[in-house]
Image (cartoon, helix red, strand yellow):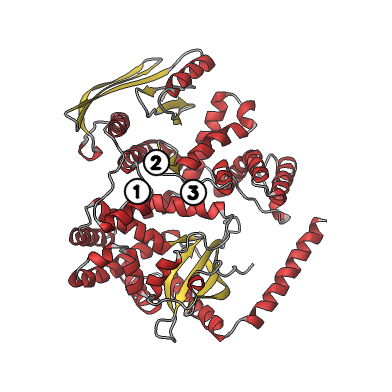
Amino acid sequence: MYPIRHSEGFLHGSALVSLAFWDGFMLPILVSHGAADKGWNRLLQGLTGTSPVRAKFRAEIKNGVRGKMLGEIQVLGGRSIKMTTLSIPTQSKGFVARGTWRRAAGLAGVALLASWLGGCATEPKTPEGKIAFEEANDTAEPTNRVIFEMNQVLDSAILKPAAKVYRGVLPDDTRAGIRRIFNNVRAPVTFANDVMQGEMGRAMQTVMRLAVNTVLGFGGFFDVAGQYGMQRHDEDFGQTLAVWGFNEGPFVMLPIFGPSNIRDATGLVVDSFLNPIGYVLSFGANAGRTAVEGIDKRAEVIEPLDEIERTSVDFYATIRSLYRQRRNDEINNGQPGSNIPAPSISDEFLDEKPADPTAAVPGGAAKPAS
Amino acid sequence: MVRRYVLVVLMCAALGALAVPAKAGPAEDSARVFVKSLADRALSTLKSDVSKLDRDRQFHAILAEGFDVPAIARFSLGAYWEKASETDRQEYLRLFQDLIVQTYSARLSSIYNGQKLDIGTARPDGKIGMWVATKIVSPNPADESVRIDWRLRQPGGDKHKVIDVVVNNISMVVTQRDDFVAALQGNGGDVRSFLGTLRDKIAKLQTGA
């Protein structure tokens, strides 16, 4: 791989996937939409003075269902991958690719095509289908599924192998320390969101932890504050929006970043502006930070994610369900009961109407022993 | 300052621990005992060095005795349960057990490395239900503990049965339902072909593929 520092790339239209090589790691960094593409590219060019990697795709729709895609990836410094004209069906299943690059790029094109072709799922006609449709809260499901597959390709080609190497090279303790540094670096974001949620006690705790761990814990490598009973917690702007009363909005599968929803995706963008370190470090250093953090997170879930994929009937739907439940839990700060079936559902469970309709679902589960 | 704070917290926790058994009735106690024995069986199965076939067999027994499988299975099919014919329902129930055994036998043995289960408190859930809070504690102190809440009910009025296992506030039953319902929605609501998918999945998992 080439030690190229920055990259850019764009797809005409809505989805943009940019792949970068950074210090030997192939690094996916940027996703944006529509008109923002040009702005991003200009910004990147301004920052780097040049555009070392350029990926360009053009997609055409023919006969409503089959599309044609032209693509080219140029790498400054000697390598150029030209994509041949591909005729691809809008469903990725039928898409046969040679080489990961082509497949990933092709699937990006497919995602684009699918969204152009009106990727919004049509509401089903059967009553069961209608219930399932409402429950899933996934109006752009066809597009999301294609993006999910694209992410899977990128994951198996880049992220998962990198995570395996990372885990193989560094011992558990070192990785845990690195993770603590990342958490420490993220503390200002948590603090800002604690404050915006009106959680002053938790905000204080975040500041204390940041101070103690930065000074006594060598920048956060050691969790000294945690040893004194100041436990870490995480907050993000998606959670703040939820606390302010915004609902999650439809589910979206973001390229590279994975499962999200309109609210949390908004939060992701806002949080990226909330962290002072983003302004302190150079673009490349920030990209590297994001990459290592992503690899570290991925390294923690290699086996569990494999198992979930292997055992679920519909992996995409399982991830969607797990994402929503985990976010509900995070929004409620670990308070029990956030994902317990509503009374009407527990009636089904219990096969009988409880005397008091509110009694079926308690305020939550019992508190764990501590 | 910090030390005093820790001490106060510890004292409160100790008082809380003392206060709980005094309040807990016999139903709470029996629920805690039930979850403990169920977890002990599962953990000793994971601990023992048996073949996959034997492990699966033991999980089958634990599932059949400790869980209200028909209720969980029915819930997992969502609104499609009503659509399924009686024959399909019978077939589905059989497949559901196999799938759950295969799923959790694989998932649990892939993550097991000597964890222990701490049984916490129990509290009522409706008229005939009970919640039991537990915590998975890893032998490695760096690992965060995992919280598991067991939702029980007593269908016949005496024996406890598990109807949901909630891991860090993520309901396993809800996750299962979302998985199945999406698969069914994806194939146009065809229960028959869904059963075929389940059969294939189970066959794959049994051979460890």
Which quadrant of the rendered structure holds the C terminus of chain B?
bottom left
The chain to which mark 1 is attached is A
- Give the image location of residue A83, x and y in percent: 26, 22
SS type, badge 2: strand
First reached walking from the N terminus: tag 1 or tag 2: 2
The chain to which mark 2 is attached is A
SS type, badge 1: helix
In the picture of the structure, the residue carrying the numbered disc 3 is A300
In the picture of the structure, the residue carrying the numbered disc 2 is A253
Image depth: mark 3 or mark 1 in front: 1
Q: Distance between the residues labelled 3 and 1?
A: 20 Å
- Give the image location of residue A185, x and y in percent: 63, 38
Q: What residue type is labelled 2?
A: Met
In the picture of the structure, the residue carrying the numbered disc 1 is A316
Image depth: mark 3 or mark 2 in front: 2
Relative to A328, residue B22 above or below: below
Tell me, yes or no, if residue A84 can be seen here: yes
Tell me, yes or no, if residue A312 can be seen here: no
- Give the image location of residue B207, x and y in percent: 26, 61
Tell which of A367 and A64 is nearer to you: A64
Q: Residue lying farthest right?
A: B1
Q: Mark 1–mark 2 contact, CB under 8 Å?
A: yes
